Image (cartoon, helix red, strand yellow):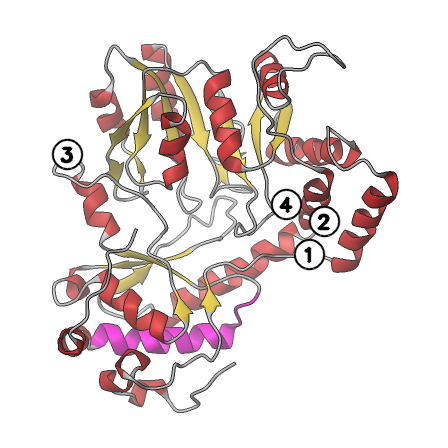
């Protein structure tokens, strides 16, 4: 895969690919390519499904998958869905949210769209810069007579201040839902994510470290809510030809469930690879002035799904995160600005500050430690010569679109 074999620490900034040289990597390295698990076991399950011709409609693989997820998370109910966004939409509706719902301003756009799609106003709230999650003090300030709920988002595997948000929700009579798309197999104070609030929503999209091809789920300990979720994901059917509730088609199919069961068998392996990569990045970048890899709490369970580089003022006062992103992309290092949507403005200063500083680095099972070492050498060259890099980019006479 490598094109260059020279010591990158001897490279000059002007020799980088963005300025016309060959890229360091001949093929793109991504933040997360899909994990597959044991291929033979997966195909065996696919063949069983095809032989049975039971492809969807709450089949045995979906039921088995739901049981396994509920056991792992430590809840009574897992309601599997076709994807995480539909799971969010159905959970929001099942909880009776309306009017205004408070959400973090630093989150993937689906969190807000799931509300707006149903005519609910998302009220954007600033974050705590230490955890990149909702700041409970600002949540309290955002509550109005129209507020019906709070959606907390666990970011990168960092968890919200769950206890503070739960206290606020209880005191004001609000529903509390957690978007846990980043936090499957993570814990909070020794308790698995998925068992907090009225419910939590999981995403099993192909780009997540644990995937079901495409899928999601709502997990909860609320019996009544779980029953409502099951009705709503299947058009409201309570019998073969009886509909007693307004619903939609949000069901997970059998092939996706089979992928999920297979992925569960390799879950520890996936996490171990992610942790190895995270630790290698931490070691390689430990002495680089201007950037640091966000640290995870080793006393908690974590999926280490994201390796997050946070730039500080040593770098940002002479160059921008987007310029670093542009240079890395030209080297086929497909770092991501986070894929997050934010509402910029003076009322959200912490969010605005954070979005100018974070970059997710390539990781996952397709990334080797040797790749990481070279990526970090590139980062050192760019970061330690940030001023020169900016001047050279300015000389190209082309701009770069702002990161999402």
Q: Which residue is mark 1?
A: 37
Crowd band around label 2 with a 10 angstrom C-alpha radius: few (<14), some (14–19), many (20+): many
Taking 201 as reference, is 140 above or below it?
above
Taking 123 as reference, is 44 above or below it?
below
The circle drawn on residue 262 is 2
Question: Disc 1 or 4, which lies upstream in sequence?
Answer: 1
Q: Magenta stretch: give its range.
A: 366-384
What is the CA distance from the residue labelled 1 to the residue labelled 3?
Answer: 45 Å
Q: Which residue is mark 4?
A: 212
What is the CA distance from the residue labelled 2 to the residue labelled 1?
Answer: 6 Å
As helix, strand or loop, the secondary structure at mark 4 comes to loop
The circle drawn on residue 347 is 3
Image marks 1 and 4: residues in contact by CB distance under 8 Å? no
What is the CA distance from the residue labelled 3 to the residue labelled 2?
Answer: 45 Å
Q: Residue at x 19, y 71 (%)?
A: 398
Across and down, in percent, residue 202 comes to 53, 36
Q: Main secondary structure of the magenta part?
A: helix
Decide if residue 26 is in sight here: yes
Taking 224 as reference, is 79 above or below it?
below
Image marks 3 and 2: residues in contact by CB distance under 8 Å? no
């Amino acid at each position: 895969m490598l094109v260059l074999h020279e010591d990158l620490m001897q490279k000059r900034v002007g020799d980088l690919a963005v300025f016309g040289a060959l890229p360091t990597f001949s093929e793109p390295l991504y933040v997360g390519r899909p994990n597959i698990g044991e291929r033979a076991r997966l195909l065996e399950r696919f063949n069983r499904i095809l032989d049975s011709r039971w492809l969807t409609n709450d089949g045995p693989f979906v039921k088995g998958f739901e049981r396994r997820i509920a056991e792992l998370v430590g809840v009574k109910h897992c309601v599997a869905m076709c994807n995480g966004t539909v799971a969010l939409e159905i959970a929001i509706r099942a909880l009776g949210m309306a009017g205004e719902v408070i959400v973090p301003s630093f989150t993937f756009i689906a969190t807000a769209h799931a509300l707006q799609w149903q005519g609910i106003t998302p009220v954007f709230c600033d974050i705590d810069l230490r955890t990149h999650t909702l700041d409970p003090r600002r949540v309290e300030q955002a509550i109005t007579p129209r507020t019906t709920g709070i959606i907390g988002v666990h970011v990168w595997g960092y968890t919200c201040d769950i206890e503070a948000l739960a206290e606020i929700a209880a005191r004001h009579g609000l529903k509390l839902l957690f978007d846990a798309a980043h936090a499957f197999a993570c814990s909070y104070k020794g308790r698995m994510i998925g068992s907090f609030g009225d419910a939590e929503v999981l995403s099993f999209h192909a780009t997540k470290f644990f995937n079901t091809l495409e899928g999601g789920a709502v997990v909860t300990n609320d019996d009544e809510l779980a029953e409502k979720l099951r009705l709503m994901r299947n058009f409201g059917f309570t019998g073969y030809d009886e509909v007693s509730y307004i619903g939609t088609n949000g069901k997970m199919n059998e092939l996706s469930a089979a992928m999920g069961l297979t992925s569960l068998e390799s879950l520890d392996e996936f996490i171990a690879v992610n942790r190895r990569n995270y630790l290698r990045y931490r070691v390689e970048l430990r002495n680089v002035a201007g950037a640091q890899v966000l640290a995870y709490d080793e006393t908690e369970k974590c999926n280490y799904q994201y390796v997050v580089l946070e730039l500080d003022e040593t770098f940002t006062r002479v160059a921008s995160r987007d310029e670093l992103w542009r240079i890395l992309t030209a080297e086929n290092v497909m770092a991501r600005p986070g894929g997050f949507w934010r509402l910029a403005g003076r009322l959200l200063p912490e969010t605005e500050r954070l979005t100018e500083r974070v970059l997710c680095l390539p990781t996952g099972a397709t990334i080797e430690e040797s790749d990481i070492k070279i990526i970090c050498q590139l980062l050192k060259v760019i970061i330690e010569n940030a001023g020169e890099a900016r001047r050279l980019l300015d000389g190209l006479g082309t701009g770069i679109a702002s990161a999402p």
